[in-house]
Amino acid sequence: MRVARLASLPGGTPPGPAFPPGQRGVTLIEIMIAVAITAVMGVMAMGAFQRTYAAKELTEAQDERFSSAHVALSRLARELSQAFLSDHYDRKRFREPPTTFRGKDGGERDELLFATMSHARLVRDAKESDQAVVEYTVEPDPDRSGENALFRREKARIDDGAERGGAKDVVCEHVLSFDVQYWDWKREEWTREWVTNSVERQSILPTRVKVRLGLKMPDGKERAFETQARIAIIRPLSF
């Protein structure tokens, strides 16, 4: 009897069927479904990452504006607490005292100008003292169209031109409102204006100043920040 000889694979293993009995290959439709599921999962994962990154940016922007408002109000409160008036000036040169305190109501854009003893000399041997004139105003932001910013102007030398000169810088951005009120200790009420060269408040300062700063947050809503400053010297110095 003749026995048929089977060709063997390298290593001596005889060839077998392409798939084990009872199994079949993967069809093209199944591959396409698997690819589609993988793509959907990738899109979902990418969306989750994008939402996480957007939330992170929103939180950082919000923290930045909180910090900016805190720094601006802290600085303003410190300078207001050292506001002063002085009767010691050259009356031949000045018709009115060069030290002043002017708080004007401008709706949501109040203006505040005052003499303070909070000036810090940043240049060695500069001919400056701790006295200066400081002004806070709300004006259009030069770097952001359609938005306002809180500006601070400081003039290191006090003269009869308090409204002119000095260095002007942005201290807070995204400002929607800047409201200042002054405590009238004689009437025991808050007032929206205080001018020391007026007849009613001639040469006298308020005992407290309340400041409210409204900022536009990253989500488009307004957030209000408030602080109060207590002025130590409310009557003019005579030395």
Image (tube, rainbow, N blue to C red):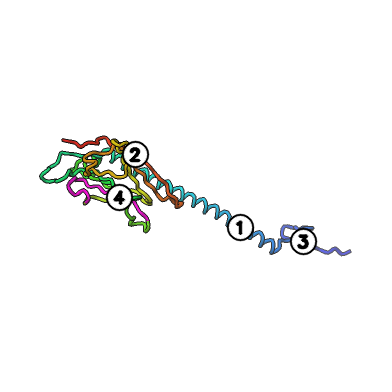
Asked whether 133 or 234 is in front, the reply is: 234
Q: Amino acid at mark 2?
A: Gln
Q: Earlier in the sequence, mark 1 or mark 2?
A: 1
Tell me where residue 90 appears, x and y as whole percent: 12, 42
- Residue pictured at 43% horizontal, 48% vertical: 62
For residue 80, say whether it is visible: yes
- Mark 1 neighbour density, 10 Å: few (under 14) some (14–19) many (20 or more): few
Q: Earlier in the sequence, mark 1 or mark 3?
A: 3
Residue bearing the label numbered 2: 228
Q: Which residue is mark 1?
A: 40
* Distance of label 3 from label 2 (alpha carbons): 89 Å
Q: CA distance from mark 1 to mark 2?
A: 55 Å
Q: Which segment did they paint magenta?
A: 147-163
Image quarter in which the N terminus is found? bottom right
Q: Which residue is the site of mark 4?
A: 137
Q: Nearer the viewer, residue 192 or 119?
A: 192
Secondary structure at numbered mark 3 = loop
Q: Is residue 220 magenta?
A: no
Q: In the rendered image, which quarter contains the C terminus?
A: top left
Q: Looking at the image, is 225 positioned above or below residue 43? A: above
The tag on residue 214 is none
User: At label 4, which amino acid type do we have?
Assistant: Thr
Q: Badge 3 local density, few (<14 within 10 Å), some, or many (20+)? A: few
**Where does residue 103 sit, x and y in percent of width and height?**
28, 45
* Residue drawn at 10 percent across, 44 percent down: 92
Q: CA distance from mark 3 to mark 4?
A: 88 Å
Q: Are marks 3 and 2 in contact (CB under 8 Å)?
A: no
Quarter of the view holding residue 96? top left
Relative to 66, is 8 above or below?
below
The nearer-to-camera label among 1 and 3 is 1
Quickly name the residue at label 3: 17
The local secondary structure at tag 2 comes to strand
